[in-house]
Amino acid sequence: MDCIFCKIVDGTIPSKKVYEDDKMLAFYDIEPAAPVHIVMVPKEHIASADELNEENSAVVAHIFSKAGEIAKSVGLKGGYRIVNNCGPDAGQTVFHIHFHLMGGKPLGKMC
Ligand code: AMP
Ligand code: ZN
């Protein structure tokens, strides 16, 4: 499948990894929108939040359960924001579900 994040998961495309286990990978975003900007992805290809269902959504809880540990490991002390863009109006550009973990300064309001 021609998916950038599947290729990052399988190692075809390099990434600066922060955390990995059997279900997920977290790596630094190539175009950071905050002083610290990590992307957290499931290893399973799910195109977007719109594709989540009872069968495949447990990995989302798993990713959120690791977010605090990941934030701590990269030195985020003042909190962080987790963002998911779903579909064109949200500006989703990579159609493999992912959660942006951002921080390192006061991030201000959402929109
Ligand atoms: P979104 O716009 O929510 O779909 O987010 C996609 C994110 O993936 C953007 O913040 C990109 O900068 C990031 N991105 C795209 N390609 C790479 C890559 N090869 N390594 C790390 N981050 C990437
Ligand atoms: Zn994928």
Image: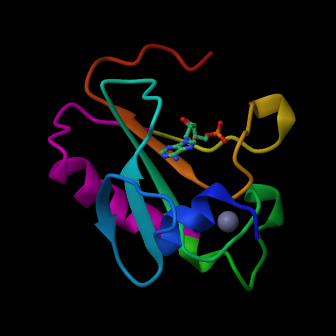
Q: Position of residue 49 (x, y in %)?
A: 74, 57
Residue 6: x %, y % from top left: 61, 67
Quarter of image, res 81: top left
Q: Position of residue 4 (x, y in %)?
A: 63, 56
Most distant residue in the front direction? 12
Dividing the picture into quarters, in which one does residue 69 lie? bottom left
Q: Quadrant of ligand 1?
A: top right
Classify residue 3 as left or right of residue 30: right
Residue 1 seen anywhere in this rendered image of the structure: yes
- Looking at the image, which is closer to me, 31 or 73? 31
Q: Is residue 97 visible?
A: no
User: Where is the C terminus found, in terms of image quarters?
Assistant: top right
Give the magenta range. Answer: 60-81
Identify the residue at horizontal 47%, vertical 29% (top origin): 31
Percent across and percent down for residue 99 are: 54, 50
Q: Say how many tags the image has.
A: 0
Residue at the (75%, 57%) spot, across then down: 48
Asked which colour scheme the image uses, the reply is rainbow
In the picture, which quadrant includes the N terminus? bottom right
Main SS category, magenta section:
helix
**Residue 76 is covered by the magenta coloring:** yes
Is 51 located above or below residue 36 in the figure?
A: below
Q: Is residue 80 magenta?
A: yes
Q: Residue at x 75, y 81 (%)?
A: 54
Position of 67 relative to 25 (above/below)? above
Q: Position of 69 compared to 85: left or right?
A: left
Q: Residue shown at 32%/17% (left/top)? A: 106
Above or below, 14 against 63 in this view is: above
